[in-house]
Image: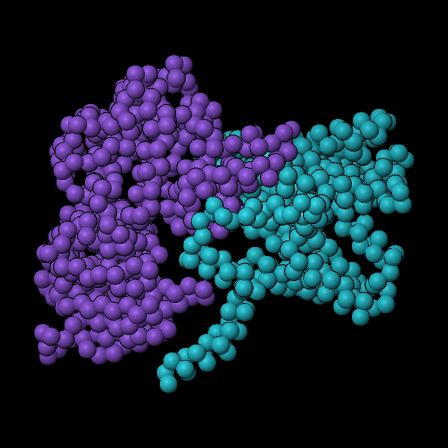
Chain colours: A cyan, B purple
Amino acid sequence: MGEKNKMDAQRDGGIASVTDAPADKDGQGGGHLLDAIKRILPQSYLVLVLLGIIIIGHLVTPNFLTLRNFSNVVSFSSIIAILAVGQFYVILTGGIDLSVGAILALSTVVAALTLQTGVDAGVATIFTLGVCSIFGLGNGLLVVWLRIPPFIATLAMMSVVQGFSYIIQSSSLIQIENETFVVWFSDGRLVGIPNPVLIFLVVTVAAAFTSRYTTFGRRLYAIGGNREAARLSGLPVSRDLLITYSLSGFLAGLAGLLAAAQLLQGSSLVGRGSELDAIAAVVVGGASLMGGNGSPVNSVIGVFVLATIINIMNLVGISSEPQLVIKGAVIIVAVFLSSAGGVGRISATLSGLFGGRKRGGAERS
Amino acid sequence: MTVQAVNATVPELRIEGITKSYPGVQALNGVSITVKKGTIHGLAGQNGAGKSTLIKILAGAEEPDSGAIFLGGNRVRFRSPHDAQSAGIQTIYQELSLVPQLSVAENIFLGSLPLRAFPRIVDWAEMKREASSALARIGVDLDVRKPVASFSVAEQQAVELAKALRKNARIILLDEPTSALPPPDVRRLFKVLKTLASQGETMLYISHRMDEFYELCETVSVLRDGQNAEELSTKRSEPADVVSAMLGKSLAGSISAGSLSSGTHPRLGKGRGDKVLLSVRDLHEAGKIAPTSFDLHEGEVLGVTGLVGSGQSALVGLLAGARQKSGGSIEFAGKAVHLSSPRDAIRAGIGLLPQDRKAHGFVPEMSVADNMSLASLPMFSRLGLLNDRKISREAQNFASRLEMRIFGVGQIMKTLSGGTQQKGILARWLMRSVRLLICDEPTRGVDVGAKEEMYALLSQFARSGGTVIIASSEISEAVLCDRVLVMARGQVVAELDHDEIDGDGEEVLRRFA
């Protein structure tokens, strides 16, 4: 709120000419690394929310703040976090991708089937990711060429992909016995970090870097912020949208590989509804569904906010039905506080209740 | 509209010492205005002078910190827009507040649909009758059963007026009602407003167009920096006086003054050079633009003018690659070009300042620097990686060159005034070093001061070797160009050289119909 007032004051005052304003964006020499870190780090409030939840968790159950539980939560979240990063990019452009859950399932089936034929794990991986990217590209083509609204296009794609993976699966589930594959995407470790966590970290950092430091990232913010202004500025809007939807498909495929290695099977039933978890995480992370703002790191923190709450509820023994209710409530509160400008409205209401009345009285006297 | 023992000396509306401050800003400081019954009172001022705050206070959307409002001599206090409306102050905003899908009658009665005695359902017959008579009062005849969306902007404005009149309207606040109207409709609206005034309605009229005050009003109050700057009688002053009062300095010799007063008018460009930059042959768009041919010389400022919707916007849109042509050829800098997207046009060296700044011009949530660099990202990157320091430095550069009033290039674009935003978009093209700048209504919705600056910048661009096309429905803007193409119904109907145009632009106007 204070920040906003300052902004308003700046606009209405509109005094200073820019000539003597310092290059405020660059900061002083030496602090570049710190600056860079500051830019990548999300707004503090979301981190505070996560910290608050962690403190509550620690207070209600001693089992929460243990290394084992921590690694549980992180491993559990890796898959959704990867989905959320892809989803973030789509939402950034003002779209939405409902098909990622289905593509995740397809990924497990395709991976299991290709591995069953006895090919190398690397070949299976590349093939699976390729197939998933193509379905993502399909979303992009529907949106860009046929101009079908993203919600509808990806809803239809979800149905297509679900049916498709069911057809090619043809039996109830397919076991995965390729050990290399399982080590890569589930059991292996590098410098003590489980591979799934490593993969998700690499994806997140790469996404954060892309969104902040590349022309591609900047173009996506522009496209989501004002599509027509972006087009009239000569940005390759159609191409960027195609890339974004393909990327979402690719990341859903990657998430599917983790799921397949974790479950040791391919099944078209895996990951039902996970697209909604990813979308929830992105909006909890403060991104607007209208597009043009937010950050992938915030989206990933959004995943952890939701995952931590569920973890705490599991630890204290709340059964799964009330969990759903609480999860829904958390999403509403978090989105109200972030995207809907809830903090500002609450403080405005409070100052209206107290400050405003006082001033009104003074005026009348 | 109750009959009162009207004392001719009691003003219908009196505002006294209104003060309003927002955190850090004094929006209004002791503003007083008196409006006589049955008159149209003009209210002028630059953007940020406090006009909109004053309107908001009168409409009940904001409460003043101090000061008083009197209606017919009685003090009134508004806590909400509803209070103001029931006291008889009706506001017609720039953006009309009608529901496009509903019928005219429904819109006029919105919120208070007439009901039958029994059963309590909507009395359509009554509604139609009443709506027609409300429209008849302002001299308009529309089929009240048809949806509002099927009528022109002018007719929609009439519906809005009828809606305001049907409620108890003692004062009607008109906030730039002509900003979206073509000239013939403006004339019709003025007739309606004059009729209403003669019937005893009282109006407060806000506009950026000086000549309108001198046609409608007896008195114009000018605000500057939240204070009363001057109160001018239109009989004893001229438009340039209002502008001087708005700016707080004499206008003598400036571009706007030149275009306001009849007689001589300055030119933005230095006239045509000898090299042809753009050569258009039989360019057309089915249903919009008839085959058009012309040459544009380097350093020239070409105006394309006509009534709103005569095709000037569409024509320049084709040249900027924003629209698809159906046929014809374009040659730019000696090479045949195929402009099938803005991207193609920009690559060739053509930049567009779009007409609808907010919807098409900039990314509201992005910073000034990011908006400026949007068309030049490859210039600021290597292997896809952005160099933010370079962007910021360059943006800084252009911001000071264009004298943008900002706190830093990191400021978010949507927090700037219209004129400053327009400069930001201009900077985008200067940064990209375009050779041809296409401006579609470049000064729409910006105040006089910003207009002046915009003209100066365009002139500077043209005189330093750039070439400009200005599409405009404002005569006063067209007459500043080196050459003017006049359009009507999607066709170029005349081509006039700067010297052939008289100060009032009668020569141009004559060809509009």
- Find residue B386 and report its image quarter: top right
- Measuring from the top left, give residue B492's x and y in whole percent: 22, 26
In this rendering, the answer to whether A364 lies above or below B273 is below
Q: Is residue A284 left or right of residue B28?
A: right
Name the residue located 49 percent from the left edge and 39 percent from the top edge: B397
Q: Is residue A91 visible?
A: no
Q: Is residue A82 left or right of residue B47?
A: right
- Find residue A189 and report its image quarter: top right
In this rendering, the answer to whether B1 lies above or below B134 is below
Name the residue located 30 percent from the left edge and 25 percent from the top edge: B300
Count of marks placed on residues: 0
Instruction: Please tell me which residue lies in front, B439 or A142.
Output: B439
- Measuring from the top left, give residue B476's x and y in whole percent: 21, 39
- Measuring from the top left, give residue A263's x and y in whole percent: 83, 44
Instruction: Please tell me which residue lies in front, B108 or A238.
Output: A238
- Measuring from the top left, give residue A165's x and y in whole percent: 71, 36
Q: Is residue A171 left or right of residue B66?
A: right
In this rendering, the answer to whether B359 lies above or below A363 is above
Instruction: Please tell me which residue lies in front, B360 or A93.
Output: B360
Image quarter of the C terminus of chain A: bottom left
Name the residue located 37 percent from the left edge and 46 percent from the top edge: B419
Name the residue located 40 percent from the left edge and 46 percent from the top edge: B420
Image quarter of the N terminus of chain A: bottom right
